[in-house]
Image (cartoon, rainbow, N blue to C red):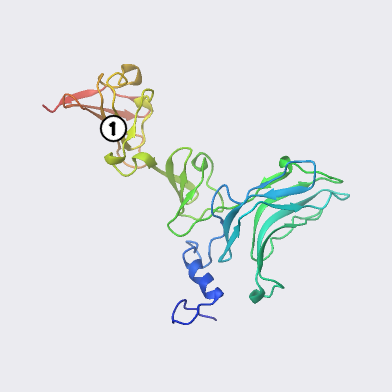
Amino acid sequence: MTITVDWQTAKPVSAQAMRYGLGAAMLKSSAATPRAGVLRTDALTASAAGGSMDVSVSTGQAMIARYVFTSDDTTTVTLDVGGATARTDLIVARVYDEEAGDASTEGAIEVVKGTSSSVPDTPDRAIVLASVAVAASASTISGANLTDKRQMTTGQGGLLWLPGGLAAAVPSWLDDGAAIWDSSADQIGVNDGGTWKKFADVGSLIGPDRAVDLGASTDLDTLRTPGWWYQDSNDDATPVLHYPVLSAGALEVLRWNPSSDRVIQRYSTYNNGGVYVRTYFGTSWTSWKSFNLT
């Protein structure tokens, strides 16, 4: 058994010690092993323009076995032409380290060639970016041959940027308890044992000081997520959009409990101190009830 204590003395810190220290911030929730994956959804994406066997991989960063992998320029790799039978190749980001027994110390994006009978194994200190279906006798490949295999990651307590993530199933690679920001829905979600536990819109998550502008077209009937909104214009607070009164004001949306479909809306007008309340239960809203505070 080997026990390593990082940064214990004023002596120069080894590369391995630096990796272990960095890896501590990237540990999985269920094991003493670091997370691995790309650090942005637009990082290290593979593409093929067609007309050749070339695959291009965009710039980006990744964590690979405690190593920080950085590619600051587009990398192009060339696959072997198709053989007598179809096969599947892998495009990987890989770390080589002489201290770990490799012949060199470097990072690389490379092809791992498959066979007709099996998909190749992922090499040590590597992550898979894409798989490529190579047809028999193929001399060109296109985007249709590529399947994105990247996994995303972030440090402990970090928020993973995953546009559209909450509209899909929880990825199998996402740790239990890990959080994402779905910029498409402007919502935060947490992996709760393979299902999404969603929070309020990011713009209204903190409180009334982060309230969201309702604008001229938001229908209040559609707002059932807890949060805060405001309406600056009397003219836009119309009955068609289910406002209780033609008056600018502030809207609060409350819920009985996180799993309930019972919702309360409270609309407070700016000009006359009026407060209006209604509830949603099941499939419909009740009518607005008014309370005058003056």
Residue carrying label 1: 264
Q: Is residue 41 visible?
A: yes
**Where residue 171 sits: x, y (%)?**
55, 48
**Where residue 79 sits: x, y (%)?**
78, 52
Inspect the image, locate mark 1, and give the three-letter code of the amino acid beneath it.
Ile
Seen in the picture, residue 214 relative to 103 is either above or below; the reply is above
Residue, far left:
294
Quadrant holding the N terminus: bottom right
Q: Secondary structure at mark 1?
A: strand
Seen in the picture, residue 159 relative to 269 is either above or below; the reply is below
Mark 1 closeness class: few <14, some 14–19, many ≥20 residues within 10 Å = some
**Where residue 48 sits: x, y (%)?**
72, 44
Q: How many marks?
A: 1
**Where residue 141 sits: x, y (%)?**
77, 43
Q: Which residue is located at x 38 percent, y 28 percent? A: 222
Residue 230, quarter of picture: top left
Quadrant holding the C terminus: top left
Q: Is residue 201 visible?
A: no
Residue 68, quarter of picture: bottom right
Q: Which residue is located at x 36 percent, y 36 percent? A: 225
Seen in the picture, residue 160 relative to 2 is either above or below; the reply is above
Q: Name the one closer to the observer, 84 or 112.
A: 112
Seen in the picture, residue 32 relative to 4 is either above or below; the reply is above
